[in-house]
Amino acid sequence: MTIQDWFEKRKEAQIQRRALEARAEVEKNPDLWTKCVHCDAQLLKEDLAANQYVCPVCDYHFRINARTRIKQLFDEGSFEELFGDIKPTDPLEFTDTESYKNRLERAHEKTGLNDAVVTGLASIKGHRLAAAVMDFDFMGGSMGSVVGEKVTRIIEKAVELRLPVLAITSSGGARMQESALSLMQMAKTSCAVSRLDDEGLLYINLLTEPTFGGVTASFGMLGDIIIAEQGARIGFAGRRVIEQTIRQKLPSDFQTAEYLLKYGQVDVVAKRKDLPDILGNLLSMHEPVLK
């Protein structure tokens, strides 16, 4: 055996030992650890949170809820929630495997939210704006009547106060439990964005993992500037549905933020840590127009 072979074997043994030690630590304290869904790395939850829920090994951007997004993105203490008391009803008395009423109750218990979007006024790098932040944890971020109403109201508030609007999307699409009432929100929110445009006010979309369905087909892709978070999946129908329809295999990166940037569907793909600076610069550049 050569010296080089000996060093290689020693290095391999050290790697295996560290892996066993890490596995033993995970088994001993499972609540302290989580696994990256992209690279399978074992990560301390505390370290992951400190890194803005981005995997330090492969740079995968974990999905985060609305409250976490607000804390990360906006200036500390600047977010003032509006329209948080609006609650959904069950106009169709809808039931599939479970009643809509029960699903809403469970979603509220899970997230502490009344519906899948949080709206309010905030600032980024000292620049004031109105914001709508969607939460996928609330029934897959689906858009029902309340989501459409709150997005419309925050846009109307922005028109009143002459503020730019930032819509942060994370959604599986329209909420089937509200049927046509949900689909109507696509037209409603799109009309609100059109009014914002008529007023000459800036509208920015931030598309995060995942953004699909009726949100993509309405207020989610109507921005003057469209930013996508790195690695986010964005589209209308899901990949499997499209493949089954056209009977063709789609590219491996299809519907990713990077794929959409390549074909001109988004303007910027950004890392999470860079978003405050990017948005702050955009708001700063457009401020003279807003005054």
Image (cartoon, rainbow, N blue to C red):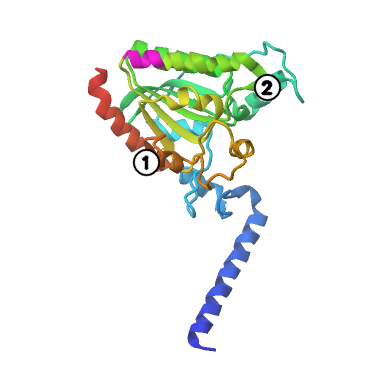
Q: Quadrant of residue 75?
A: top left
123 drawn magenta: no
The reply to whether the C-beta atoms of the residues labelled 2 and 1 are less than 8 Å apart is: no
- Identify the residue shown where x is 63% and y is 24%: 108
- Identify the residue shown where x is 58% and y is 39%: 239
Q: Quadrant of the N terminus?
A: bottom right
- Magenta-highlighted residues: 194-199
197 drawn magenta: yes
Residue 260 seen in the figure = yes
The residue nearer to you, when weighing 201 against 67, is: 201
Q: Looking at the image, is 253 positioned above or below residue 237?
A: below
Which kind of residue does numbered mark 2 sit on? Glu
Q: Secondary structure at mark 1?
A: helix
Q: Looking at the image, is 132 positioned above or below residue 255?
A: above
Image disc number at residue 274:
1
Instruction: Tell whether 59 sits left or right of 161.
Output: right
- Identify the residue shown where x is 33% and y is 36%: 278
Distance (Cα) linking label 2 and label 1: 36 Å
Q: Looking at the image, is 134 positioned above or below residue 32?
A: above
Residue 88 seen in the figure = no
The residue nearer to you, when weighing 236 against 125, is: 236
Q: Position of residue 61 (x, y in %)?
A: 49, 44
Instruction: Tell whether 93 sits left or right of 16.
Output: right
Packing grade of label 1 (10 A; few <14, some 14-19, many >=20) is: few
Q: Earlier in the sequence, mark 2 or mark 1?
A: 2
Q: Position of residue 145 (x, y in %)?
A: 57, 15
Residue tagged 2: 105
Q: Secondary structure at mark 2?
A: helix
Q: Quadrant of the C terminus?
A: top left
